[in-house]
Image (cartoon, rainbow, N blue to C red):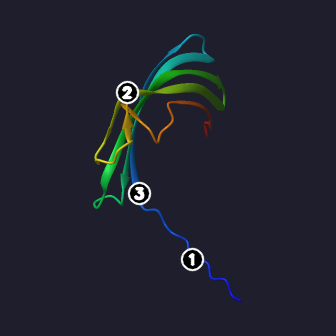
C-alpha cells in the first residue's frame, strides 16, 4: 500500500517593523536605554496584502561595549494599543494582540568590522 503525503504548504505573509530607541552612557562600556518597536504583519505579499495586525512594544535595555563586540540585553512589554484589520473574533483582547507575546526578553550580540 502506498501512502501519499500532501505537498508542503507555503505561508505567504509580509511584515513591516519600526524600531526606535535612546540610550545614556553610564561609563564608556555600559549604557542603559529604552526601545520602542512597532510590528505590522499582513496576510499576503506586499502590494496584495490584507487582514493585517499591528502591535506595539516598549521596554528597557542594557548595553555593554567591549570592542569589537557589543552585547545588548533587554525586555519589552506589549502595549495595549494593538489593532487588527479584520473582524475575526479573539484577535484583540483588552487592547493586546493575542497571537503575540505579552513580554519578550532578548539578547543581541554584534561585532564592529574594521
Decide: few, some or many residues near mark 1? Use Cα within 10 Å; few <14, some 14-19, many ≥20: few
- Disc 1, disc 2: CB below 8 Å? no
Res. 13 mark:
3
Looking at the figure, which quarter contains the N terminus?
bottom right
User: What SS does tag 1 mark?
Assistant: loop
User: For the point 55% across and 71% down, which residue is it?
Assistant: 8
Res. 6 mark:
1
Q: Is residue 79 visible?
A: yes
- Relative horizontal placement of residue 58, taking residue 72 as reference (left or right): left
Of the pair 33 and 79, the residue shown nearer to us: 79
Residue 20 on image: x %, y %: 40, 29
Res. 52 mark:
none
Of the pair 91 and 72, the residue shown nearer to us: 91
Q: Residue under circle 2?
A: 80
Single out the residue that lies furthest toward the right. Answer: 1
Give me the C-alpha separation between circle 1 and circle 2.
40 Å
User: For the point 37% across and 29% down, which residue is it?
Assistant: 94
Name the N-terminal-most of marks 1 and 3. Answer: 1
Name the N-terminal-most of marks 1 and 2. Answer: 1
Name the N-terminal-most of marks 3 and 2. Answer: 3
User: For the point 40% across and 26% down, which residue is it?
Assistant: 79
Residue 15 on image: x %, y %: 40, 49
- Relative horizontal placement of residue 52, taking residue 31 as reference (left or right): left
Decide: few, some or many residues near mark 3? Use Cα within 10 Å; few <14, some 14-19, many ≥20: some
- Disc 1, disc 3: CB below 8 Å? no
User: What SS does tag 2 mark?
Assistant: strand
Location of residue 57 (image quadrant)? top left
- Relative horizontal placement of residue 75, taking residue 45 as reference (left or right): right
User: What SS does tag 3 mark?
Assistant: strand
Q: Is residue 30 above or below residue 103?
A: above
Amino acid at each position: 500500500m502506498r501512502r501519499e503525503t500532501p505537498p508542503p504548504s507555503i505561508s505567504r505573509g509580509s511584515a513591516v517593523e519600526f524600531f526606535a530607541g535612546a540610550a545614556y552612557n553610564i561609563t564608556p562600556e555600559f549604557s542603559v536605554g529604552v526601545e520602542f518597536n512597532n510590528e505590522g504583519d499582513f496576510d499576503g505579499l506586499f502590494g496584495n496584502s490584507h487582514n493585517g495586525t499591528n502591535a506595539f512594544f516598549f521596554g528597557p535595555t542594557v548595553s555593554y561595549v567591549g570592542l569589537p563586540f557589543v552585547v545588548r540585553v533587554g525586555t519589552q512589554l506589549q502595549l495595549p494599543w494593538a489593532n487588527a484589520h479584520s473582524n475575526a473574533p479573539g484577535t484583540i483582547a483588552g487592547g493586546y494582540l493575542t497571537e503575540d507575546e505579552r513580554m519578550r526578553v532578548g539578547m543581541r550580540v554584534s561585532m564592529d568590522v574594521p
